[in-house]
Image (cartoon, helix red, strand yellow):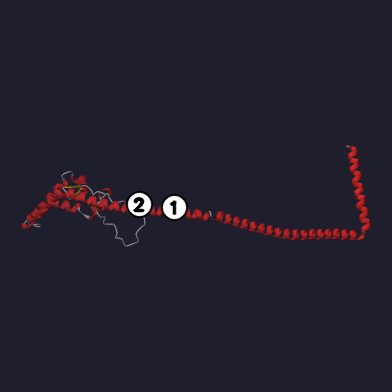
Amino acid sequence: MLARLALRGLAPAALRSLAPALSAGVVHISRPFHTNQQHLAPLPPLPETGGKVRHGIIPEEFFQFLYPKTGVTGPYMLGTGLLLYLLSKEIYVINHETIAGMCIVGIIIYGVKKYGGNVAAFADKLIEEQIAAATAVKDNMINSLEKAIEDEKKEQWRVDGHHYLFDAKRSNVAMLLEANYRERLLTVFTEVKKRLDYQVAVQHLMRQKEQDHMISWVEQNVRRSITAQQEKESIAKCISDLKMLSKSAQAAV
């Protein structure tokens, strides 16, 4: 009866009726293979620890599945009945290989109990190192991308400020042109003033030379027109005038 119950409980229809919360380790029969294009929806994160098991290998979901129908002892009775059925029908015959298998299983269990913690710690350490290396690579990539974004923003800011630079350069060029123009105007003014000053100086020199020539010509003509007798008379007249002035000065004293 237990054998029929086990076969009936393991039917595909029963597997299809498993609740989603109790079928974490069971592959859905109705799930198709990946024959179409995969969706780009985010996948749920993988569990960090395995599901609960009893006696080392039996999933907890198996006991929860049989609990509503058979109670607490149902799974144990199912396993015992299935083992007795296999032995009574001689489907499974105990021989020396069974003893060897039990010894191997015992050694495996002992090894797991003895060294499982150390192996798990070593594996966790390797996983942590790999995660740290991957995190470091991710952080470096994030930092490099952030720096690239900052550089791009800075370049965009520089591009936005180019028109200010161009305006300043245009102003500088305009100031240089104005300064050059004014410098050339000053040069022209200076050269024209020099030429005008030269003409004025030439005219003044010519007028002075003409005056000197006129004075010398008048003096020469006057000297030529005065005779020796007139010169003596004028000298005598001057002497008499000087004497008269001296007498008048003495009389006033």
N-terminal of the pair, mark 2 or mark 1, is 2
Q: Which residue is mark 1?
A: 150
Q: Name which residue lies at 19% across and 51% down.
A: 9
For the residues marked 2 and 1, what is the alpha-carbon distance in whole angstroms?
Answer: 16 Å
Q: Is residue 104 left or right of residue 243?
A: left
Give residue 12's quadrant in the image. bottom left
In the rendered image, residue 42, in percent from the top left (x then y), is placed at 35, 53
- Element type where label 2 sits in the image: helix
Give residue 27's quadrant in the image. bottom left
Q: Name which residue lies at 25% across and 52% down.
A: 127
Name the residue nearer the viewer: 13 or 240.
240
Q: Is residue 74 left or right of residue 216?
A: left
- Element type where label 1 sits in the image: helix
Q: Is residue 24 left or right of residue 164?
A: left
In the rendered image, residue 87, in percent from the top left (x then y), is placed at 8, 54
Q: Decide if residue 154 is in sight here.
A: yes
* Amino acid type of the residue that numbered disc 1 sits on in the rendered structure: Glu
In the rendered image, residue 50, in percent from the top left (x then y), is placed at 23, 49
Name the residue nearer the viewer: 39 or 134.
134
Q: Decide if residue 17 is in sight here.
A: no
Name the residue nearer the viewer: 16 or 165.
165
Q: Which mark is residue 139?
A: 2
